[in-house]
Amino acid sequence: MNISIHYAFLPHTDAEAALGFYRDALGFEVRNDVGYDGLRWLTVGPTDQPETSLVLHPPATDPGITDTERQTILELIAKGSYGALTLASDDLDAVFEHLVEAGADVVQEPMDQPYGVRDCAFRDPAGNLLRINQAG
């Protein structure tokens, strides 16, 4: 049996800012851009990995969510405590410099972690935490 990751989901609070980060800064391709009722769902992914996609979705749009719950979700997103994603690159330092030049929100510069990973961290425009590991 073979199981793979097809979609992962992260909220966005501004579709254009999300495109600026994921498409323009990270270099992901846009695979789908769907608007409905004034909201947008964006599907993006690495150009060399067509089977793996990230869906950037408007947060807290489920019909059963109360206004109080919606506000809590938006506060957690803004703090970077709601969604997270770990990426990998064969050249962590180059990716870090590229994202800094693109104006990304740096959380942690590249460093060797005590658990054996070299990584850095950024927040996307919505506040989601993105860690980038040195691959291999």
Image (tube, helix red, strand yellow):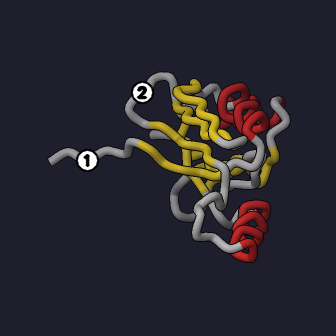
Q: Secondary structure at mark 2?
A: loop
In the picture of the structure, the residue carrying the numbered disc 1 is 3
Measuring from the top left, give residue 75's x and y in whole percent: 78, 68
Quarter of the image where one finds residue 99: top right
Q: Amino acid at mark 1?
A: Ile
Q: Which residue is mark 2?
A: 50
Q: How far across and how far down the image is residue 136, in percent? A: 45, 40
Instruction: Indicate the quadrant where residue 33 lies.
Output: top right
Name the residue nearer the viewer: 37 or 41.
37
Q: Residue type at mark 2?
A: Pro
Where is residue 123 drawn, in percent x and y?
74, 50
Whichever of labels 2 and 1 marks the residue nearer the N terminus, that label is: 1
Give the residue displayed 43% in from the left and 36% down from the top.
52
The kind of secondary structure element at disc 1 is loop
* Residue sitting at x 80%, y 40%: 104
**Callout 1: few (<14), some (14-19), or many (20+) C-alpha neighbours within 10 Å?**
few
User: Is 105 above or below relative to 45?
Assistant: below
